[in-house]
Image (cartoon, rainbow, N blue to C red):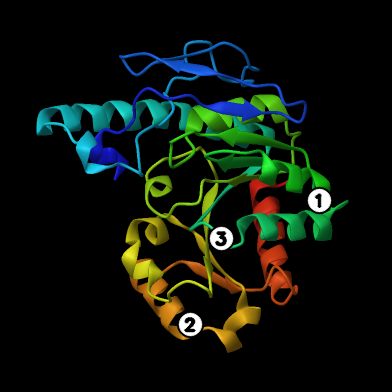
Amino acid sequence: MCERCGCSGNDHTQLHSPSERHVLEHVHADGTAHSHAGGQHPHIHEDHQGAYAAHGGDDECHPRHHVHAPEVIDLKMRVLTKNDEVAEINRTWFAQQKVLALNLVSSPGAGKTTLLERTIRDLRGTIPIYVIEGDQATANDAARIRSAGAPAVQVNTGTGCHLEAAMVARGVAELQPPGGSLLLIENVGNLVCPAMFDLGERAKVVILSTTEGDDKPLKYPHMFRAAEIMVLNKIDLLPHVDFDVQHAVRHARAINPGITVIALSARTGEGLDAWYEWLHREIEADRGPT
């Protein structure tokens, strides 16, 4: 896992705006980063911009990157502390602006982007939605989101296996979501490292699809413990797959007794009303009394 192997190192992060402007970040030996281009987060000072370097490493923390124990402890504290500092700045800004930020996490192929596309189309005109798309490469998903009708920026992490708070800060500076809007952050497809990296979001939304094993919550307990809601996607495929919904829910609640579970199909629309009701409740709670 990222906190143990010390695989955060020299790497580049690219942020693709709708105009395809690139932000290229150079990472120095002390872990700090310098950006050649890109907007400033409205509430991030210059010394915090890019405070935490882009995560790197081969094959999601290959064992050859392991270092001696004292260095591991020092690196873990340094990496997570810098990330958490920027995450708190993000969180403060979101709260001040009444922007509801949600961090969508899942394995690759669970249907995060499809759920976002359907949500944007169905809620168009009722909630202003903005999207930060995280992937290791390509701007394909951001293009899909824009086609669905929402502003989006693509953050490419290179060999990095998760988004970080500084990446989200740069994405927010590019998007400039207005007060009262919904910011959906689609993290890199990975159920391990994103569990540890706070982005300043209001909640993590873990998406589990019926094409995966129903024991995933037990295999990846840190992610399901960190999530506030589990969206069980692709229920239209239940007649064709070996997946037990009750087992999946029981396993998730064994890890996180308070987790909310919503079963739906982003493709057919079944169960989406419950997802939209949850979003509306969270938005109203985030906005507070008028």
Instruction: State the image quarter where residue 256 is shown.
Output: bottom left
Q: Is residue 71 left or right of residue 162?
A: left
Instruction: State which quarter of the image contains the C terminus.
Output: top right
Q: Nearer the viewer, residue 44 or 9?
A: 9
* Mark closer to the chain start, 1 or 3: 3
Tell whether 275 sits left or right of 57: right
Q: Residues within 10 Å of mark 2 (few under 14, many from 20)?
A: some
Mark 2, residue position? 243
Amino acid type assigned to the residue bearing label 1 in the image: Ala
User: Residue 236: where, in percent of width, then height?
Assistant: 66, 80
Mark 3, residues whose alpha carbon is within 10 Å: few (<14), some, or many (≥20)?
some
List the residue tagged with mark 1.
Answer: 148
Q: Quadrant of the N terminus?
A: top left
Instruction: Report which residue position mark 3 lands on.
Output: 109
Upstream in the sequence, badge 2 or badge 3?
Answer: 3
Q: CA distance from mark 2 to mark 1?
A: 30 Å
Q: Please tell me which residue lies in front, 281 or 241.
A: 241
Q: Are marks 2 and 1 in contact (CB under 8 Å)?
A: no
Q: Is residue 104 above or below residue 51?
A: below
- C-alpha gap between disc 2 and disc 3: 16 Å
Looking at the rendered structure, the secondary structure element under dot 2 is: loop
Q: Nearer the viewer, residue 29 or 126?
A: 29
